[in-house]
Amino acid sequence: EPDIESIVVPDKEYFAAQGLQATDGPGRERIESIVRNEVKERCRDLAAYKRITKLTVSHEELEKTTTKKVKRYLYTGRAAGLDLRDPKG
C-alpha cells in the first residue's frame, strides 16, 4: 500500500493560548508531540489505505500562491518526519 504523507503547520495562536511557544526547544517539542498524537488518534479509526503514514510538523507557513493556495508541487515527497505504522506507539 502506498504511503500517505502529510505536512502539518500548528496554529501558533492556539498553542500560545495554551502557554506553549514554538520558539523554544521544549515548547516546540511538546507542540510536535501533541500534533503527532492527535493525528495518530484520528487515523486510528480510518481504513488502512486512508491513514497518514508519514507526518512532518512544520513551524513555518507553507508557501502559497497569490490566491492563498498551497504550492503543493514544492512539497511533494517531503513529509518524512514520522512513520505512524510503528507498532510501539
Image (cartoon, grey):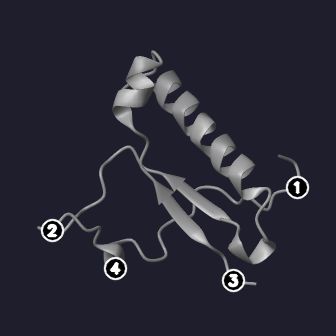
For label 1, the crowd category at 10 Å Cα-Cα, with few meaning under 14, some 14 to 19 and many 20 or more, is: few
Residue hosting label 4: 73
Which labelled disc corresponds to residue 87? 1
Where is residue 40 shown, x and y percent of the image?
Answer: 71, 50
State the CA–CA distance, disc 2 to disc 4: 16 Å
Where is residue 77 shown, x and y percent of the image?
Answer: 49, 76
Q: Quadrant of residue 32?
A: top right
Give the SS element for disc 2: loop
Tags 3 and 4 in contact by the CB under 8 Å rule? no
Residue 22 visible in rendering: no
State the CA–CA distance, disc 1 to disc 2: 41 Å
Q: Residue at x 58, y 58 (%)?
A: 55
Which labelled disc corresponds to residue 2? 3
Where 69 sits versus 88, above or below?
below
Label located before the other in sequence (1 or 3)? 3
Please tell me which residue lies in front, 53 or 46. Answer: 46
Tags 3 and 2 in contact by the CB under 8 Å rule? no
Please tell me which residue lies in front, 20 or 42. Answer: 42
Residue type of the residue flagged with mark 1 = Pro
